[in-house]
Image: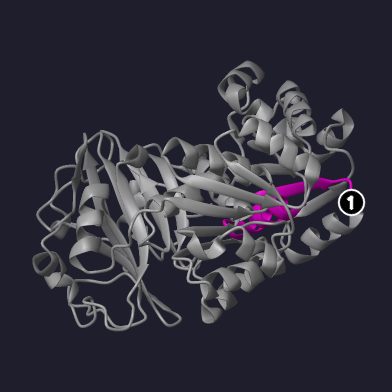
Amino acid sequence: MFNGRKNMEIVVIGCGKVGKTLVEHLAIEGHNVVVIDINQKNVEEIVNTYDVMGICGNGAIHDIQLEAGVNKADLFISVTSSDEINLISCLIARKIGAKNLIARVRNPDYASQISFMRDGLGISLMINPEKAAADEIARILRFPSALKVDTFAKGLVDLAEIKVRPGSKLVGVSLSDLNRKFKTSVLVCALQRQQKVYIPDGRFTLEEGDKVHITASHKDLEKFMISAGIYERKIKSAMIIGGGRIAFYLTKQLAEIGIKVKIIDNNEKNCEKLSALLPKAEVVCADGTDQDVLLEEGIEYMDACVSMTGIDEENVIISLYASKCNVPKVITKVNRLSIINMLESIGIESVISPKDITANQIVRYVRAKANKGDSGIETLYKIVDKKAEAIEFIANKNVSFLGIPLKKLKTKDNLLVAGIMRGNKLIVPSGDDFIKAGDSVIIVTTNSFLTSLEDILA
């Protein structure tokens, strides 16, 4: 048992980038995991690194699944590089008795029929890392003042990460004075100062260099940014380097909100396909790592640059050059999580990792399945370099502390009720506020593995 919940029997097919990241999360959370991959080296690497079992073989084969115990699995996850293998594997797993199924489906051709496929094939969750990454980039571009923006309550509540810059109006302001000084309603729910992470109270005073996580409605967050002097003008043009699936999904979103997009990719066939699919975008077939190409295509006049080739080092170099060209918003795609912490020291601050986003989606689903029934997990984000979590629960009538003022609850240390969504109204909680059945409740904590609202109590 872990945090009062039953550990789940989980089988994961595919030990690539997403699979490895996912297994890391699941193993840390204490679940019993079996991995399957056709590459013996990949299996051995994961088995030697984490406390999991491994089988070398084709996960779409009935006998291999039986050997892995899929017939007794609480959850079956297929994240190979092939959508079709993932779907077939899930069909077989369902037939032999797996209780819940998750498949990675990436092909844009399938995007319009995800709901149909999920319902028709009996798959619990279908995930698309590239689409999820595009969603995250689009949120940042809609709110360029923030390093990162996550959402809760079906998009009605923002969780924004900002940095306190030298000379900022925020320097020296105590959190208890924040809303009075800037005439708004926001809540600082987590803060990173150098390498330390805090769940701060009102006595905390902001300092230069702090990375601050704020919850607020979109309107209040924008009002706060303007009042604090950190609001950046809206993005009107964006250059995307790399024409993969993320670029496709992202460009579709940006075109819908009127942002002019230029895509640079060095694959001629890919460019032809993107030009046909994205008539509102300008697609240039050229080497996006070439300085002359970037200058010729007007990088100096862009509001944003998103670097997402298939090579991390290229993305970092392009982003550094974009920053040197004074592009206001620079976003970098990185696959190797080990280098993310080094990037801030060289000025790269908005970083996205598709495989990490996918792992978070699946961990959220696993937590929801493992909870004790008094609340359901709607959203889960790892924040502050994964040292804290922001979790949205839906409170039902069985929560033991409904109607009790928050100041009377004895909650765990390093935990904050960061927001209560009641209907369409966001309550920025004070000690006198309370939780009602049906509320969306946002919890921010450095205590890992919460699966239930009851877990917030000490």
Label 1 sits on a secondary structure element that is loop
Write down the quadrant of residue 169 in the picture.
Answer: bottom left
Taking the image as drawn, is residue 423 in sight? yes
Taking the image as drawn, is residue 80 in sight? no
- Relative to 130, does residue 242 appear above or below in the rendering? below
Q: Is residue 309 left or right of residue 378?
A: right
Mark 1 highlights which residue? Answer: 39
| Rendering coords of residue 2 (x, y %) | 51, 54
| Rendering coords of residue 291 (x, y %) | 67, 69
Magenta segment, which residues?
Answer: 16-39
| Rendering coords of residue 48 (x, y %) | 80, 65
| Rendering coords of residue 420 (x, y %) | 23, 46
- Relative to 59, does residue 309 appear above or below in the rendering? below
Q: How is the image coloured?
A: one colour
Judge the density around disc 1: few (<14), some (14-19), many (≥20) Cα neighbours within 10 Å: some
Camera-side residue: 354 or 385? 354
Answer whether residue 366 is magenta in the image.
no
Image quadrant occupied by the C terminus: bottom left
Q: Is residue 9 left or right of residue 132?
A: right
Disc 1 residue type? Asn
Write down the quadrant of residue 259 in the picture.
Answer: top left
Q: What residue is at 84 percent from the left and 56 percent from the top?
A: 42
- Relative to 297, does residue 132 appear above or below in the rendering? above
Q: What residue is at 35 percent from the left and 41 percent from the top?
A: 155
Give the total of numbered labels: 1
Q: Residue furthest front?
A: 296
